[in-house]
Amino acid sequence: MIKPSVTFILWLAIAAFVVLNDMVGDTWIGAALSVLSVEWYKVLVPLPYVAMLAVIHARRTAGPRWLAAALLAALLWPVSTMLVDFLYGRLTYDSEPAAFVDRFGGPYPLLIGGLFALPLIAGAAIGRR
């Protein structure tokens, strides 16, 4: 069954976690590690959390329309999380849009791919039952 409210609430949790993780990476961890290490930190730390929320989403939306619910999450989560991440950099550090685009040369696409693929994988594994 499609439950847009569940998808939206879980996305809010993801967005809050990504922004808080970016803050920690930019302040505490950024002082001790190289720029590339901080970028890897910002990508690898949220992925298990996203996987957990994708499983929760799949369990809550299991049923005959699991694919539609998984596609909703797979399309909403990456795009909106990129927007929140862009706004965080823009509002906090007054960074230019080119600085955000430069993140795609590093490990950042792995996070975006995870945000897209994990709801589909969890939905296929759990939603069919």
Image: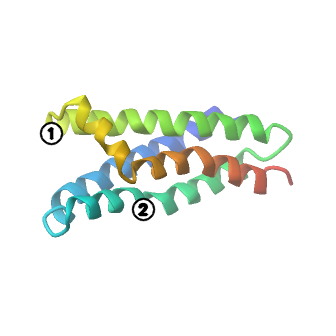
Q: CA distance from mark 2 to mark 1?
A: 22 Å
Callout 1 secondary element: helix
Whether the residues at callouts 2 and 1 have beta carbons within 8 Å, the answer is no
Numbered circle sitting on residue 60: none
Amino acid type, residue under disc 1 in the picture: Tyr
Residue lying furthest bottom: 32
**9 lies left or right of 97:** right
Coordinates of residue 5 in the picture (x, y in percent): 60, 35
Callout 2 secondary element: helix
Where residue 90 sits, quadrant-wise, is: top left
What residue would you read off at disc 2?
44
**86 lies left or right of 95:** right
Task: Name the colouring of the figure.
Answer: rainbow
**50 lies left or right of 92:** right
Residue lying furthest top: 97
Q: Please state which of residues 62 and 45 is positioned toward the viewer in this rendering.
A: 45
What residue would you read off at disc 1?
93
One can see residue 48 in this view:
yes
- N-terminal-most mark, 2 or 1: 2
Q: Is residue 32 above or below residue 93?
A: below
Q: Please state which of residues 78 and 107 is positioned toward the viewer in this rendering.
A: 107
Coordinates of residue 49 in the picture (x, y in percent): 49, 59
Q: Residue at x 20, y 55 (%)?
A: 26
Q: Residues within 10 Å of mark 2 (few under 14, many from 20)?
A: some
